[in-house]
Image (spheres, grey):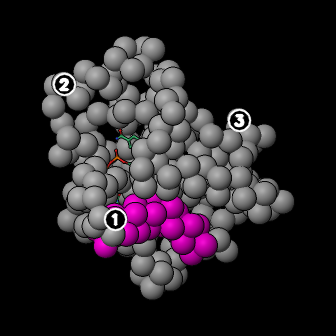
Amino acid sequence: MTRTVLVTGGGTGIGKAIAAAFLADGDHVVISGRREDVLLRAAEELGGQVTALPCDVTDPEQLEAFGERLPDALHVLVNNAGGNREFDAPPPGDLRGLAERWRANLDANLLGAVLTTAAVDKQLVSGGAVVNISSFAADRGAGSYGAAKAAMNSWNIFLARQLGPRGVTCNVVAPGYVEKTEFFRDRRSEQFHEARVAETMVGRAGQPQDMAEVVRFLASPAARHITGQVVRVDGGVIPTR
Ligand code: NDP
């Protein structure tokens, strides 16, 4: 059976690898993101049954229109869009700057997934799956970004309860440090990379494909009895407080 899979943020990095994994299984994959040029380039590179549909997941109006353009039946939703808008803290006392950064991270990493799921709710079919991409940052005291991802982990349990009776599983994949994506584009240095790798038990950085394989499993019939869970895919990093 050909399934329809939606991957938000599917034009780059982890999302693009997730899209490739489902395409390899013969599924129809819709990739979304804000930049149409990036999506179109990715669609061309990915090949297969892929549809590029631009949409900002933090914008309810865009999402309403987006939901209507999707096929009637959606088998897998991967809420992958996100990123850290708060690498640099504002100066002490700058409450407006602080509010701006917190809102941006909560919007991109939490509300975006909540709104996207609501926008496609009626299309989600029995036997389907929602996979939310959180982060190991949820357990690392990582400011507004970590707080947003921790809230996503919590919301996932609520969602699993809500969609369970409809035969839809909901799980979180929490990546550790994953190289070769746009996420750390302003942070890349040999020193930073080495420090992240040294935190792992396996002595290597995560690759987008490492995340994609686990997402694919969680969305497969083999994982039908797994729901409401957080799977850390971080090469074995001890949570820090
Ligand atoms: P990327 O920056 O490559 O991917 C993020 C994707 O999300 C982009 O395609 C971006 O596209 C899209 N996106 C961001 N904001 C929005 C929005 N408002 N609406 C729609 N799309 C949006 O980084 P990664 O692939 O690394 O990140 C993917 C996910 O993995 C994120 O949720 C991130 O938090 C998480 N993660 C990544 C880690 C890493 O080490 N790389 C570690 C832990 C978690 P566009 O800009 O065109 O909208």
Residue 41 left/right relative to 156: left
Percent coordinates x, y for residue 225 in the rendering: 78, 40
Mark 1 vs mark 3, foreground winner is: 1
Does the magenta stretch mainly form a helix, a strand or a loop?
helix
Between 43 and 176, the one nearer to me in the picture: 176
Percent coordinates x, y for residue 130 in the rendering: 61, 54
Magenta stretch bounds: 96-120
Specify the quadrant of the image occupied by residue 115: bottom right
Magenta segment includes 78: no
Is the shortest distance between ligand 1 and the CB of mark 1 under 8 Å?
no
In space, the residues marked 1 and 3 are separated at their CA atoms by 44 Å
Q: Residue furthest right?
A: 165
- Figure check: 221 above or below 12: above
Amino acid bearing label 3: Ala
Residue drawn at x 28%, y 59% is 92
Residue 190 left/right relative to 230: left
Element under disc 2: helix
Do the residues under discs 1 and 3 have CB atoms within 8 angstroms?
Answer: no
Do the residues under discs 1 and 2 have CB atoms within 8 angstroms?
Answer: no
Magenta segment includes 119: yes
Q: Which residue is identified by label 3? A: 222
> Which numbered disc, 1 or 3, marks the residue that appears first in the sequence?
1
Mark 1 vs mark 2, foreground winner is: 1
Q: Which residue is identified by label 2? A: 191
